[in-house]
Amino acid sequence: MPVHGRRKYVRVLAATAVVTAAALAAGAQSAGARPAAGGKEKGASAPELGDCARGELCLWEGADFHGERHTYELSNTDIESCVRLPKGATVSALANRTGRPVTLYQSAECAETAEFKTHPSGSWTPKAPYQGRAFKVWER
């Protein structure tokens, strides 16, 4: 290969190496900026689940499992009966670990004319769409 051709070949190789290195560096930076699979961006954290033992229905007066907590167990709760919360108390978050479905009612009388929703066992609801005032535990 003539000297002139060799210099051109070396310049092309050098330019290719620089472009390749820049592309690799950019790819490494963008890969480092993305969260891991299934991860979340910084600052976008889910609320911590409230403390609720197996076999319990736990109701919090504040959203995101904050505020006063009311706990009920099947041993002291009649199945398919309307259970009112203490006077003046409302529910904004709940965890159902009873092993049975639980319906949370906006009405203190478990009336189906107001809002209500059934939560399956094992569900955690950090923000109920309404203030709950009573509930029913169902057989299945």
Image (spheres, rainbow, N blue to C red):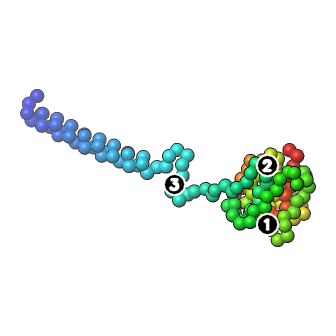
Q: What residue sits 33% from the left and 46% below the top?
A: 25
Distance CA(mark 1)–CA(mark 3)? 33 Å
Tell me if label 1 and label 3 are in contact, CB under 8 Å.
no
Q: What residue sits 21% from the left and 37% below the top?
A: 13
Q: What residue sits 61% from the left and 56% below the top?
A: 46
Residue 120 horizontal/vertical position (percent): 78, 48
Task: Name the secondary structure under disc 1.
Answer: loop
Q: Which residue corresponds to mark 1?
A: 90
Along the viewing direction, whichever of 66 and 136 lies nearer the viewer: 66
Residue 103 horizontal/vertical position (percent): 83, 54
Q: Around disc 1, counting alpha carbons within 10 Å, would you say few (fewer than 14), some (14 to 19), or many (20 or more)? A: many
Along the viewing direction, whichever of 18 and 76 lies nearer the viewer: 76
**Across the whole image, how many numbered discs are drawn on residues?**
3
Outermost bottom residue? 88
Q: Around disc 2, counting alpha carbons within 10 Å, would you say few (fewer than 14), some (14 to 19), or many (20 or more)? A: some
Distance CA(mark 3)–CA(mark 2)? 34 Å
Q: 55 above or below 129?
A: above
Can residue 118 be seen?
Answer: no
Task: Name the secondary structure under disc 3.
Answer: loop
At label 1, which amino acid type do we have?
Thr
Q: Which residue corresponds to mark 2?
A: 55
Q: What residue sits 63% from the left and 58% below the top?
A: 47
Distance CA(mark 2)–CA(mark 1)? 21 Å
Q: 69 above or below 138?
A: below
Q: Which residue corresponds to mark 3?
A: 41
